[in-house]
Amino acid sequence: MITSALPYANGPLHIGHVAGAYLPADIYVRYLRKQGKDVVFICGSDEHGAAITIQAKKENTTPKAIIDKYNAIISKAFSDLGISFDIYHRTSAPIHHETSQEFFKTLHDKGVFEERESEQYYDEEFKQFLADRYIKGTCPVCANPNAYGDQCEKCGTSLSPTDLIEPVSTLSNKPPVKRKTTHWYLPLNKFQDWLQSWIVEGEGRTEEWKKNVLGQCASWLKEGLHPRAITRDLDWGVKVPLPNSEGKVLYVWLDAPIGYISATKQWALNTGKDWEPYWKSADTKLLHFIGKDNIVFHCLIFPCILKSHGEYILPTNVPANEFMNLEGDKMSTSRNWNVQVHEFLEEFPGKEDVLRYVLCANMPETKDSEFTWKDYQARNNNELVAIFGNYANRVMVLTEKYYGSKVPAQVDSVEQDAYVVAYRAQVAQLFNDYCTGIESYRFRDALMAFMDIVRLGNKLLTDFEPWKLYKTDPIRTEGVLRICLESLYDMATLCEPLLPFSAGRLNAYFNLPAAPKMAVGGVNLTSGAGLGSPFYLFEKIEDQVIQSKLDALESIRRSREAVTAAETTIIAANPIKEAISYDDFSKLDLRSGVVLSAERIAGADKLLKLTVDLGFEVRTIVSGIALHFSPEALTGKKVVVLANLLPRKMRGVESNGMILMAEGKDGALHFVAAEGNAGPGDSIS
């Protein structure tokens, strides 16, 4: 059972998504099918949650219209790129709602959930509770002013809405208030010991997990798990199947992974198969292919849900990839900094395998990687065209020239030649490397092994020089080209998981279906059998094509910088916030202070740890001013401190207060200090 993360149906698919969760899964699945394995490959559109309703508001339409629009775009992009799902489903389907509600009801009846009343943010103007993504504010870790209530997309930190500094509703752009509401919580803290044993210590696991996956899980476990709400106050999603729960839906990260199960059920209905062995049989291997931003849900939360249910197997592995960046910057749909898959395929017809090749070669398997248009061009021209395509075309052309596009006969003396024997031994070793790479989720290694096999073919052709040999020994030439043709047939077999469109074209040339098994070195061709006409597998990409893509990105960058500058100007010209009463102001306890010392916080570019004398006590305050002031320049500096701000941990350091700063129109920060004889601790009013 292979799953790839369900993409949100609130925007198109970009190549970073493909490199993270879908291409590696497709390569692995295609390889398993060539091995004759019983495998089902599941995915579908994630069509619930606040992200959908937010996009609907942006486009002034309904959530249903949004999911229909983007499901069509995404599913077609997958199909056109050759991602070979057995089913691409939708979480808006009735069978998914039924499955999710059954899951919730089972866990509820078993007493797994905790029902709690809590205070959550509420937008008084729109009269609704705010899901995490409806709240924005300043990230407490990196000071990004546009962090969401569930995650900061700049530094990647997972957050809760109460972590944000100065939160505002994305609906009204006003500060929300807190109101009481009741929700059901999954008590992750009760699973802490089991998760520690299973994930970190590996008890009961049969495969080693990636270090980046284990590292993130270990970090969460070290900080300590807490109960997590698995319902939301929202009108779009799977309804909570309990009495008196109107207006409440399942949290999208509860119902989305269950989407794998409901999709499998639908696949079984479509094919007349039984879905249960794929989820409940002890001899089934369950794999989740995801990006690193989904690790916590697939490695911690979903396994706890499956284990609580009691009838389902746990994942054998979660081979999560890191992020792929674009031309030195993080890919982002909202900032229009990406390469959308459907647009690429429309602009570059016939280049599906080129994109697959480049994304695989740069796959972010253990660390973030980067896509650049120059690298895309270089890999196409210098590797696919010059090595693979060149070998295929030369073999086809020579076979047509000397043997009328018919398979030459085997020649025993050539088969037994020491060079040929050594060549085949090298190919066999590289084939082993290729298989090992895929089976251990190192797809870049598998691609390198494949290309090394192609390089060996080029070397064999160059060393034997059949265009010269034919003049003196046509029989030996026949044996050489027979070996070259068989190697090309092997390459068609090996490249099918990686480059399925190229494999299809090569199989058509041989007038044969795809090889039923993943193997090399067999006698797969019939002497005298007819072959197709020679062709080029790949075409050179010219400089002007690449330059046009770079120019387009530069235009986007300049536009973004212009917008940022305009926003800065607007902020500077309109600094007055919403009016408050004197009672509101009187709640602020402002004190004069003196900085005794300052130091940088490891791993935080913008934060300084300040020790501040307030007269009546010395406090530690974390301030996001490291880009403006060096620690050495701050000793003795007089400051104004908001002294009654609730403590907040930032990068592991508890901050007890806030330093007041003035920001100039140029973005520079300046200290606000009490003048005259004001001493440490004096009140400011």
Image: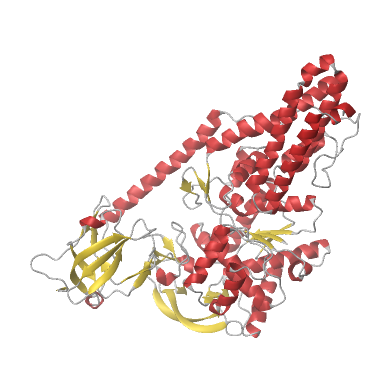
Image spot of residue 373 (x, y percent): 53, 37
Given the current orientation, which residue lies at the most extreme front position? 418
**Residue at x-position 73% and y-position 46%:** 432
Image spot of residue 206 (x, y percent): 69, 65
Image spot of residue 202 (x, y percent): 62, 68
Q: Is residue 169 above or below residue 397?
A: below
Residue 418 in view, yes or no? yes
The quarter in which the C terminus is drawn is bottom left
Colour mapping: secondary structure
**Residue at x-position 42% and y-position 43%:** 557
Image spot of residue 315 (x, y percent): 67, 66
Q: Based on the displayed image, in which of its 4 quarters is residue 282 positioned?
A: bottom right
Residue 62 in view, yes or no? no
Given the current orientation, which residue lies at the most extreme top position? 471
Given the current orientation, which residue lies at the most extreme left position? 677
Q: Based on the displayed image, in which of its 4 quarters is residue 44 positioned?
A: bottom right
Quick one: 245 or 276, which is closer to the camera? 276
**Residue at x-position 24% and y-position 78%:** 583
